[in-house]
Image: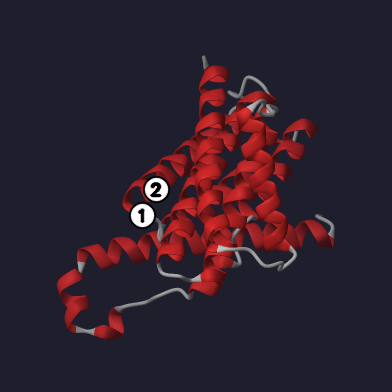
Amino acid sequence: MYPEWMKVRRHRLWLAVTFASFMTMMEIGQNQSAVHAANNWEDQVTVPQSALNSLIGEPDRHFHRAIDFYAQGDADSAAIEVRAAAALIRIEAGRGSAEDAAKLRAVTTNLDALASNIVNGNVGSRRDLELAFARADLALAAHYRTMANKALAAKDHASAGRWLKAAGDSVDEAATWTGRSPSGAQAEAWDQMHALQEKIRTSANWSYDEAKKGVGYLGAQIQYLGQQIQNFGA
């Protein structure tokens, strides 16, 4: 018998995966019956943005648990965590731009394949997991950066702050997975981005100009880490 905390954890994972599956089926159904839905508003279902916002950061919680289970030799639990993260990213892809959404969906496909490889014993080392998670975090960072830019254009200060923080956190997570820290000009941009993140976290005043620079800093860090991941892959 599983202890109570394990039952709760597995139930939460089941809910996440089930919700993602539901969203995928809903999208397929809407595509197949677009004409009918246009004539019958009752067929249209939307998910509140606040519900999606509450999922920000959750994929990384599953990534870290997957690493722990993998280190313990518990392949099944590690795979469950990876699939749960993939399900959450698939949901997030639903509100991304066309380019970002495509990248996020590609990430989820790779994560699902990784989960199967974990179960089948086809993962060479922990490093394979870390690089897959770094790629996922970079895709999320790029998506959140785009959302921040759109919010700034709309002069939506609150949303811009949320997306900048989410993008910065995702970049930091990707850096942790790669194990690489920037140097020189990259390190200076990194410090400036963290300074902005700290202002956002503590609700200190920050300006539109700072936010626009933050978007630029994020782009530089995403590009830098993307190159590092490519080097690791090579």
Q: Residues within 10 Å of mark 2 (few under 14, many from 20)?
A: many
For the residues marked 2 and 1, what is the alpha-carbon distance in whole angstroms?
Answer: 5 Å
In the depicted structure, whether residue 180 falls above or below residue 93: above
Residue 9 location, x and y as percent? 73, 58
Residue 147 location, x and y as percent? 45, 58
Q: Amino acid at mark 2?
A: Asp
Q: Quadrant of the N terminus?
A: bottom right
Q: Circle 1 sits on which residue?
A: 97
Q: How many marks?
A: 2
> Looking at this rendering, what residue extends furthest in the top direction?
234
Residue 128 location, x and y as percent? 61, 26
Q: Are marks 2 and 1 in contact (CB under 8 Å)?
A: yes
| Label of residue 100 in the image | 2
Q: Residue at x 64, y 55 (%)?
A: 57
Depth check, front residue: 162 or 13: 162
In the depicted structure, whether residue 230 falls above or below residue 135: above
